[in-house]
């Protein structure tokens, strides 16, 4: 099962070719172009290092532009909003519409992560107002879809997570091998899939009724990760639910037709899925191989800054094959899958060592067959620990047109560690 809910929230890729008639104040030096290339490739960690080296040779407005994207990637959302406001206030008359679109998309994403739905909708509306100058019609279409979601939520109170003390819960694996945690709603305990790449928590229509969710009057298009299958879904809000002794109020769920959350070949239903907005609000999570999950009262700092967010998708930086590579991290996937970027970078090695076959990839809405190469082992270094993931599928075509990362790491990677820590405050992932 791979990444079910890659909704269109990661719509912050650049649309630089559709500039207006005004001349840009950006891009008149080699440093800017070098940094822009890194941003286009979503190389957030390298961009951070290079910006620190090159900032003295650039204008203040150019530095602030890249800082806005880095603040967003490293979950500093208030600062992102301030960066964008400052750029638009001080340099707005000199910015081409294409760059304004980038900035409003970025600001919309940061507002959404902070549960400021009305503000996020306003930023999306600004994108659509400027959309006639955008060369990427898909980006505009995605933004229209996002606006449906954010407008539907504009009168919903922000999600609130109350952590009064550290808590330990016990997780199990369901029939598919997915991590399932206990969630209490209205005094009843339910099992819920724990999925770091579910951009919004999701629930079947039957269980939305059972849990008493408030159903919102909206329908929008959703996509199912690696299969690319599209379907219609809606929204609901849980007034309150508990994870251990942690209270989450105003939790937003995608309300999906029961049939979409049924995994056909396994005849198994995924009734409740806890996704990014709830997971991120827990701030720090310790996942133990022995079936414990620990959420501390206070998050801890670390010097190991290897964690970023691409919209609502977790990104981890790891060393592999003598290089530093960025991967999505997906606890809603059992197996790791390497993307076309990995195939292109290591093609000679793959053609020499891997075996070609056809594989089935399943997710919400159905199953698709794809041609892959099976790599005998993938070696990855998280900090000082090197682990080997066996029999990894390598795709030879892009799943998404703007795909930039090298793969999607599943539980076959995280299970190599007795303990793995996700920290959304100081933005690091550690394995022990």
Image (spheres, rainbow, N blue to C red):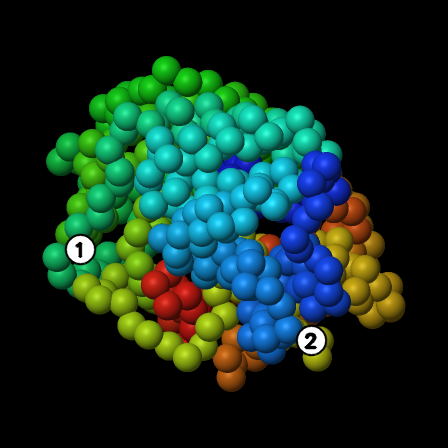
- Residue 159 lies in quadrant: top left
Residue at 78% across, 47% down? 397
Position of the C terminus, as image quadrant, is bottom left
Q: Which mark is residue 187?
A: none
- Check disc 1: other Cα within 10 Å, few if <14, some if 14-19, many if 20+: many
Q: Nearer the viewer, residue 233 or 271?
A: 233
Residue at 37% across, 23% down? 152
Residue named by callout 2:
323
Q: Which mark is residue 163?
A: 1
Residue 195 in view of the camera = no
Residue 112, x across and y down, in percent:
40, 40
Residue at 37% across, 35% down? 119
Residue 304 in view of the camera = yes
For the residues marked 1 and 2, what is the alpha-carbon distance in whole angstroms? Answer: 39 Å
Q: Nearer the viewer, residue 41 or 389?
A: 41
- Check disc 2: other Cα within 10 Å, few if <14, some if 14-19, many if 20+: few
């Amino acid at each position: 099962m791979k990444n079910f809910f890659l909704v269109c929230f990661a719509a912050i890729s650049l649309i630089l070719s559709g500039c207006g008639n005004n001349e840009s104040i950006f891009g008149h030096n080699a440093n800017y172009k070098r940094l822009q290339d890194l941003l286009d490739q979503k190389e957030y960690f390298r961009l951070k290092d290079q910006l620190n080296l090159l900032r003295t040779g650039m204008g203040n407005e150019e530095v602030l532009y890249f800082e806005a994207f880095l603040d967003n990637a490293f979950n500093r959302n208030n600062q992102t909003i301030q960066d964008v406001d400052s750029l638009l206030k001080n340099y707005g008359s000199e910015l081409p519409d294409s760059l304004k679109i980038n900035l409003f998309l970025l600001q919309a994403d940061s507002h959404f992560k902070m549960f400021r739905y009305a503000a996020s909708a306003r930023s999306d509306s600004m994108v659509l107002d400027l959309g006639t100058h955008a060369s990427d019609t898909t980006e505009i279409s995605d933004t229209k879809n996002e606006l449906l979601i954010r407008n539907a939520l504009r009168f919903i109170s922000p999600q609130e997570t109350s952590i009064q003390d550290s808590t330990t819960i016990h997780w199990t694996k369901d029939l598919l091998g997915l991590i399932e945690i206990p969630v209490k709603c209205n005094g009843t305990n339910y099992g819920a899939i724990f999925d770091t790449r579910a951009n919004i928590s999701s629930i079947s229509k039957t269980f939305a009724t059972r849990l008493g969710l408030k159903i919102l009057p909206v329908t929008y298009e959703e996509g199912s990760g690696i299969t690319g299958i599209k379907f219609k879904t809606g929204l609901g809000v849980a007034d309150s639910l508990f994870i251990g002794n942690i209270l989450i109020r105003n939790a937003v769920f995608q309300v999906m037709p029961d049939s979409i959350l049924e995994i056909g070949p396994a005849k198994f239903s995924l009734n409740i899925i806890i996704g990014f907005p709830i997971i991120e609000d827990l701030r720090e999570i310790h996942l133990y191989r022995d079936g414990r999950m620990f959420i501390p009262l206070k998050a801890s700092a670390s010097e190991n800054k290897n964690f970023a967010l691409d919209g609502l998708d977790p990104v981890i930086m790891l060393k592999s094959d003598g290089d530093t590579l960025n991967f999505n991290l997906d606890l809603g996937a059992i197996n790791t899958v390497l993307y076309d970027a990995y195939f292109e970078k290591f093609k000679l090695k793959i053609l020499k060592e891997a075996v070609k076959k056809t594989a089935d990839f399943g997710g919400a809405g159905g199953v698709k067959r794809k041609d892959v190469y099976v790599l005998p082992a993938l070696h990855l270094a998280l900090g000082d620990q090197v682990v080997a993931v066996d029999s990894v599928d390598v795709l030879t075509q892009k799943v998404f047109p703007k795909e930039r990362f090298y793969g999607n790491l599943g539980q076959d990677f995280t299970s190599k560690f007795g303990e793995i820590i996700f920290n959304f405050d100081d933005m690091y992932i550690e394995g022990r």
